[in-house]
Image (cartoon, rainbow, N blue to C red):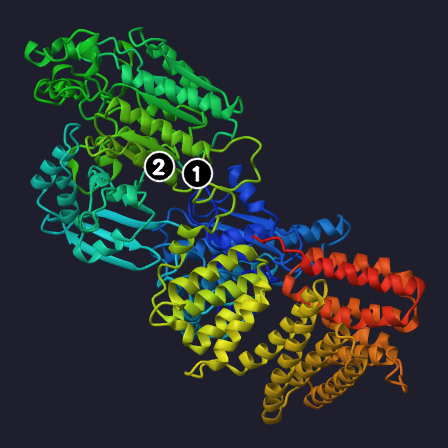
Amino acid sequence: MLETAAQSAAPQAAPNPPLRIEVVNADLKFVDEPVICGHYRGSVLAGAECLLDWLVGRAMSTSIRLGRYPQGLKAQQVFVNAAGDRINPLRSMPRPAGVIVVGLGDEGHLRASGLVNAVRLGVIAWAQHLAEEARNQQGGAGEPCVPAWFDLAATLVGSGGTGMSPGLAARSVAEGVLEASRMLAAVNWPKVSKLTLVELYLDRAVEGWRAVQLLSDSARGCYDVQHYVRSGAGGQLRPLESSYRGADFDLISAATQIDQDGAASIVYTLDTRRARTEVRAVAAQGRLLQELVSVASSSTCNDASVGRTLFKLLVPVEMRPLLDGSSEMQIELDSGTAGIPWELLDTTRDLESAENTGSADHKPWAIRTKLLRKLRTPEFRRDVEDTGREAPILLIGDPSADDRRYPLLPGARREVRAVHSLLDARLAGARRVTALVAATDTARGPDAREVVVSLLDSDWGVVHIAGHGLPVSDRLVGADAFARCPPAYGTAYGAPYGASAAASMNGAGTAANGAAANGNGAAAGRAPDVAAAAPGAAARAGGVVLSNGVFLGAEEFAKMQRVPELVFINCCYLGQSEPGSLLEVAMPPMNRPYFAASVAEALIRIGVRCVVAAGWAVDDAAAETFATSFYDALLDRRRFLDAVAIAREAAYSPDNNTWAAYQCYGDPDWYLRAPLQDHERPTADGVRGRAFDDKAIADRYACIASSHGLMIALRQIQTELRVNNADVAAARRRLDYLHAQYAQPAPHWERIGEVAEAFADAWKETGDLEQAAKWYQMAVQANDGSATLNATEQLVHTQVRLALQRVREAASGDPQRLEAAIVAAREVFRVMTASLSHLVTLYPSMDRLALFGSASMRLAMVERYARCRDAQLAAIGQTVSHFCQAEAMGCDAGNAKVYYIRIARCSTELVAHLAGQLHAYREPDWKAIGAALHADDESEPDFWSRSARSMVWIYECIASGELAQNVQSVIVDLAELHRCLPARNNWSVLYDQCDFVLAEYAEAAKGPERDAARLLLTQVETWMASEAAPGP
């Protein structure tokens, strides 16, 4: 029905009002409307999804764990926010109203038309939700009152991946929303009135804004685009890196291309946080490449120069620095490039660097970059039903082959036993682990029936097989084919079972034995083409060798109702693509009957999420080390990418190339799920929440190359502390690192005023007044004069707060220390107020006069500690005067926030009255002040508006002498505020206000009123001293 509506509506000139579009540079935390975001195929959330997931109460991550998350194009899911406003719990409405996730398919394959369709379907899904919600609220009585219009927000969907720029994403989202609105109008469902494109970084927001402006010009009357990018809360200038990327890992695509002259080349597409580029490189002649691949993939090849030669031969010069600098990389391959042993490639520059520094700890490129493969294939199983987190694990070791060509594999048996022991011990019964392996190295292994029945009998989550393998291309059909072989071909295979069987696919053995195991060496010779010898034989013979001429291949896995999430196959042939297929373009499946060059490719095609397949014969000990290290890392909840890297490094030895034999394909973020761990989320370092250790901090800020980059990093920390409730201790470590690494060394960026001011602002948010005051002082004294006037104001404010803090700390110790602190504080107040006086004389404002008042208020508290009553009263009088002047200036200027100054003036007059200084005291209209506060508090409540309501309540109780009967209610009210917004810097300011009023009231009052004042002040001091818990 909607498709028909679209066809009829499309030719019309938009009968509805144009779609209003606004581009906002802000953090998604502050968006009220439902938000559309995208998801590239994968097992974890990335980019904006992570934040939105937290905002809606982890509903999105729960859905992806249950296998119900949209992955492919045309899939979408609506998440209604039932968690409220998690950033500002003081608000009664949820923020955002909901999230619409649209599937984007595989990264690198998204096109503008596909994104338009995905967004269109996502908008329709939300409109359907609104219509159904209205019907449910109506209760079936009468016609439901469906809203005619709704506002919608969207990220720059898909722009965090390769091939989709921010501008193209913005344009496609706008087109998709407009198409959806036209279709919805035809069926009387709610339509989109306004679209808000939200982007955290200003440079990307501007690019998106330009794109929708051009779209509006080309489709006049359809769009009404706001003529500027609006700045919102939490917006940042740009990312630290030169290129934004939503995923943690870099992506490189290496695809085969044949030109019209038949020349083969590799087209590289690189998407990293440092650059996005496309380079076409003409590969070496095919025969040379095939020869190098054959040499490199031999189990007896230990020549590292072959890997360096391949790197130079295959990787364009201009891309080498980008690949060298990556720390996490996935390479997407097609059938023409999958046969290249990318794991063996290495760079000369890193070897030279290790030699120059005298380091013997040189690791190959694949280990340093955590290289992981991804297969590009036009054939795949669209509807894949994953196994649950309690799905059992199947281990198969050296199944019986009943063929003299395939000797026993004691190494494979030991590998499976070691993996079984590890999984059994670590899982402790949480998942069933079944091992089909002989008890001894000489006993018969499981036969074909036992293996196939076991495989199809349960929905296995993980399948691990170590045994003999035969490539599909050889198409040998068991013992019948072997019987047809002339004796010359069978001599090596005919070695008796027993000692000579050490030359297996898992064994290092001798060259002759290795050749015998692989079936393609000199000692074994070349088996004849059995297709000609045995017409009608099974054309698809190939896979893991079983008994009675049976093979276990992808077809058997495809018969499973739920395919495993991970398949690990240690059979040397199975990961091996034919050298002759290198740099061939994959033809359509119907023209390529033997398209699948390996079982690994076939497994991926039927929906297995992660595949590990050995490409050649491997050393026994190294293979066992790789397998156990791999599963040990997975059990530590490491990502698939990290587990592969850990296993390769553990198995690495210059004496053999086993570590590089394993071709690992799949989702980098996949992890081994375990029961009772729903609350945990895997991270790059395997723990819940990435710890900011030295290496993680260094990696995060390695791209800083200028003082502007340093300022961006500092502003990000400040924003995280102010609006994200970030981990204060981690923020302090990051600030220390940025200072030691970038600000202090030459060229001494700490001497730049705006840099010093950025440090000061960030330190102030941590609550460290000592550091903040030091940096503000450096900012205003910088020779370049780049610090703002606000730095001078904040220097005064921070210094007077710090002076009072030092007096308080000294008050509980030695009297001489207190006296020294009081003398120092008086000097600070004298100098700071003199500086502020000059500033107010030149540029008077409400805020600067109020700053004068807050300084006098703190001076009065210092004089109270000094027991100088006259000086205290004088300071109180100055405070009243300054706040009166500030209020008058705010009223004259029509400042909307003048009521904050009015509250401060009223509270100061109350203190003067309690001190007996203000004889003509007239109690203010607290109800009217509270009403003004209520209006602001309802629209956008924050810490200051809500705390001001509590403070007005306290002042009103003090003025009426009713604090004792209300103190418990006040404490409950403030406790709720601290639970929601516990930022230490804010509570420090609030404590100063309470101390100024409550301490004076405790002196003037008696009995229960005095006790209530002291109780409340003590409680606020406790809240001030407590550390805030980190946010998401």
Where is mark 2, residue-wise?
646
Question: Identity of the amino acid at label 2?
Answer: Ile
Q: Earlier in the sequence, mark 1 or mark 2?
A: 1
**How crowded is the residue under tag 1: few (<14 C-alpha within 10 Å), some, or many (20+)?**
many
* Residue 638 - label: 1
Residue drawn 55% across the image and 30% down it: 675
Residue drawn 37% across the image and 62% down it: 241
Q: Is residue 222 visible?
A: no
Q: Is residue 135 visible?
A: yes
Instruction: Please tell me which residue lies in front, 883 or 672.
Output: 883
Q: Please identify the residue farthest to the front as the structure is shown.
A: 816
Cβ atoms at labels 1 and 2 below 8 Å apart: yes
Lateral position of residue 470 relative to residue 146, left or right:
left
Question: Identity of the amino acid at label 1?
Answer: Arg
Q: Quadrant of residue 625?
A: top left
**In whole angstroms, how far apart are the C-alphas of marks 1 and 2?**
10 Å
Lateral position of residue 761 relative to residue 996, left or right:
left
Judge whether 989 appears above or below 461 on screen: below
Q: Quadrant of residue 517?
A: top left
Q: Secondary structure at mark 2?
A: helix
